[in-house]
Image (cartoon, helix red, strand yellow):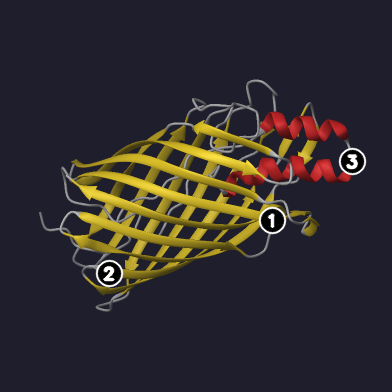
Amino acid sequence: MLISIEAGGFPDSRPACYSERRALSHVKKSNGRNLLLASLFSAASGLAHADIPSLPGAYFPFPEETKVGLLHLQYGEADEAYNGGEKVADDLDISLKQAVFRYLHYEEWNGMPVLVEGGIPIAKQENGRAGDSWSGLGDVFFGGVLWPYSDRALGRFAGIGLRASAPTGDHKGEGFVASNDRWAYNLQGAYIHRLGESKLSAEGVAEYELYSDTDKAGIETDPLYQVYASLRYDISRKLSLSMQYKHKWGAEQQLAGNDLHDGFDNSAFSLIAAGFVAPRVHILGHIQQDLDVEQGPKLTFAQVRLGYLF
């Protein structure tokens, strides 16, 4: 099977997550430090994200009947935390080690490429300063992508993605960021545009995510918005280098009409290298650093993703 390398190659997803019960217990203590920790754990989705991130190349469709198995090995950590744009805690020593197993299946419908996917994470989280730790399965996620416009010759694609995560993980409402106590529904629109005959492509993704109320705590979460802007350079048919800027805002939370936190206004920068090391074996490396943080932890994130084409 001949696969044209136009990107990092595979849509990149991480399951949705928030930590409501721990946030609620901290807020009830009503002092500044614990209000911060409530926001921190509510915002800790940066480690295993409430939204479903899209790395460069995520919206390049593979040929019909391509099947892909993926293993994401991820690590995230945070020491500093912010509230209202001001640093309010340091030396928090929060970390998450996570493996995400995914399956992708590409088909065509009415001449348009279609992707169906699903996955599940398993994770270990440690909160060094608080002395807490959890491990277990996270929330399952599933969904698909439709490409109403696809021109492989020009390297231009427009796609619409719809995905959801279900509250199926362990330790619901206990502060385990890989698991949740509510549904999340994620809509993305994306466009890839190769710049003429060059090896450079520009990519943009706009995202909108909705949440149900939490089951146990009854916390309401407003919609999350996120935009991604990426540049990708194809060194060869087997290797690409990319950089990405993303900005997210929204996802304010309320309980019984009272605000838990004012929502995100955060940005991050990523570097990505991806390519095939064998005809059916793909590897991607990704590092991300938060830049401006209005709310929650300032995160450093890294992952290696392995893919096999069937």
Give yes or no for contact between labels 2 and 1 (Cβ–Cβ under 8 Å): no
Quadrant where the N terminus lies? bottom left
Residue 31 numbered tag: 3
Give yes or no for contact between labels 3 and 1 (Cβ–Cβ under 8 Å): no
Q: CA distance from mark 2 to mark 1?
A: 34 Å
Residue that label 1 marks: 79
Q: Residues within 10 Å of mark 2 (few under 14, many from 20)?
A: many
Amino acid of disc 3: Asn
Which of marks 1 and 3 precedes in the sequence?
3
In this view of the protein, can residue 169 be seen by the observer?
A: yes
- Element assignment for label 3: loop
Residue drawn at x 29%, y 49% as measured from the top left: 147
Residue 7 drawn at (x, y percent): 30, 62
Quadrant where the C terminus lies? top left
Q: On screen, 148 above or below 175?
A: below
Which of marks 3 and 2 precedes in the sequence?
3
Residue 149 drawn at (x, y percent): 28, 54
Residue 239 numbered tag: 2
Amino acid of disc 2: Leu
Q: Quadrant of residue 106?
A: top left
Residue 138 drawn at (x, y percent): 49, 33
Q: Residues within 10 Å of mark 3 (few under 14, many from 20)?
A: few
